[in-house]
Amino acid sequence: MAATRLVLVRHGASRSTEIQIVGGHLGCRGLSVEGVFQSERLSRRWLHNPPFDMQFPYGGAYSSVMRRSQETAVIVLSPMGLSLDGSSCDLCEVHPGVTDAITWKEVSEKYQGRDMLADPSIPIALGGESWNQMSLRVVDFFSRIVYRHRGQTVIAFTHNGVIDATLERWLRGSPRGVGLGSEPTGITTWIVETGGNGEFRPTLVSYNDFSHLDGSTGQTPSVKVWKNSANGEDVTGVLASHPQDRLTS
C-alpha cells in the first residue's frame, strides 16, 4: 500500500471571531492582528523544520475559499517559496446559511432551538448545512487528495470543524461535544495508506500541535482519541505529547 502524509492546519485567529459575527462566505473578514502573528510564527517554524521530507516530499497545498484560511496559507507558504495549488469550498467550515455575517448574539436569540451538535442531521440554520453534510464533503475531498498525492506530503489550510470531521469519520469516534478543538494554526497530521482495491487506512500522527505559539520544545497537550487498529476494531488511545509520536493503544 502507498501512503500520503496529510497535514491539516487550522487558520489563524480571525477578525470575524474578534467582532463576534458568523464567518461564512459573507461574514469572513480575514485574519485578525493576532491571527497574522500566529501564522508568522508557524511560517518561521516550518522554515527551520518543514513538514515534508525525503520520505514524503512536498506534493502541494490547498485551502478553503475563506479569506482567513487563504491569508494564513500565504503567510505560511510564501517564505518557503511555495504557493497554493488550489482552493475548495469542500475545505470550508459548516455553511451557516441565513446566519452568515450576523452576530453570534443574534444567532443565540433567533436560532437557539437548533442544536447541530445534539443532532448532526439538523442544518445549523435555513439554507445551511448539517454536521453530517459537512463531514461527508470533507472526507470525500481528502479521499481524492490522498490518492492524487500518494507518496507525498499535502498541506491543507482549513477550519476546526473540518479537522474534527476527520477525527469522527476516520477514527470512528465522535469529537462532537467532548471538548476537542484545534487552536488557531494548530497542526494535525495523518498518514493515510491507500491501495488499488479501495483500501483506505488513516493513522493519526499528531493532533493540535501549536508548539510554535507557546514557545515549548515541540510538545502538545495529551488528549484521548480513538484509533482504528490494524484489524479494524476500535481501541482507545492517548495521543502522545510529542508531535512525532504515534498513538498507543
Image: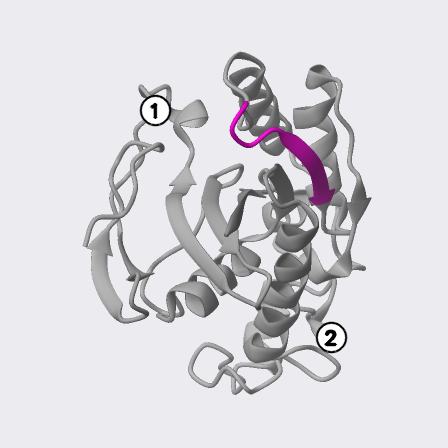
Residue 143, magenta (yes or no): no
Q: Quadrant of the C terminus?
A: bottom left
- Give whichever of discs 2 and 1 has the lower sequence position: 2
Q: Nearer the viewer, residue 19 or 79?
A: 79
Number of dots carrying numbers: 2
Residue 76 appears in which quarter of the rendering? top right
Label 2 close to label 1 by CB (< 8 Å) = no
Image quadrant in which you'd find residue 123: bottom right
Q: Is residue 95 above or below residue 162?
A: below
- Reading the image, the residue beneath label 1 is 218
Residue 170, given in percent of the width and then of the height, sits at 44, 64
> Residue 40's x, y, as percent?
61, 21
Give SS at disc 2: helix
Question: Is 199 positioned to the left or the right of 68 in the image?
Answer: left
Q: Quadrant of residue 69?
A: top right
Residue at which label 2 appears:
97
Depicted 134 relative to depicted 181: above or below: below
Is residue 93 in view from this perspective? no
Label 1 is placed on what type of residue?
Answer: Gly
Give the percent coordinates (x, y) of residue 233.
Answer: 27, 71
Q: CA distance from mark 2 to mark 1?
A: 39 Å
Local secondary structure at mark 1: loop
Q: Viewed as shown, does residue 39 lie left or right of 63? A: left
Residue type, mark 2 in image: Gly
Which residue appears at 80% of the width and 39% of the height?
Answer: 85
Label 1 environment density (alpha carbons within 10 Å; few <14, some 14–19, many ≥20): some
201 and 226: which one is in front?
201
Name the mark nearer the viewer: 2 or 1: 1
Q: Residues within 10 Å of mark 2 (few under 14, many from 20)?
A: some
The stretch in magenta equals 54-62
Seen at 47% across and 86% down, the residue is 119
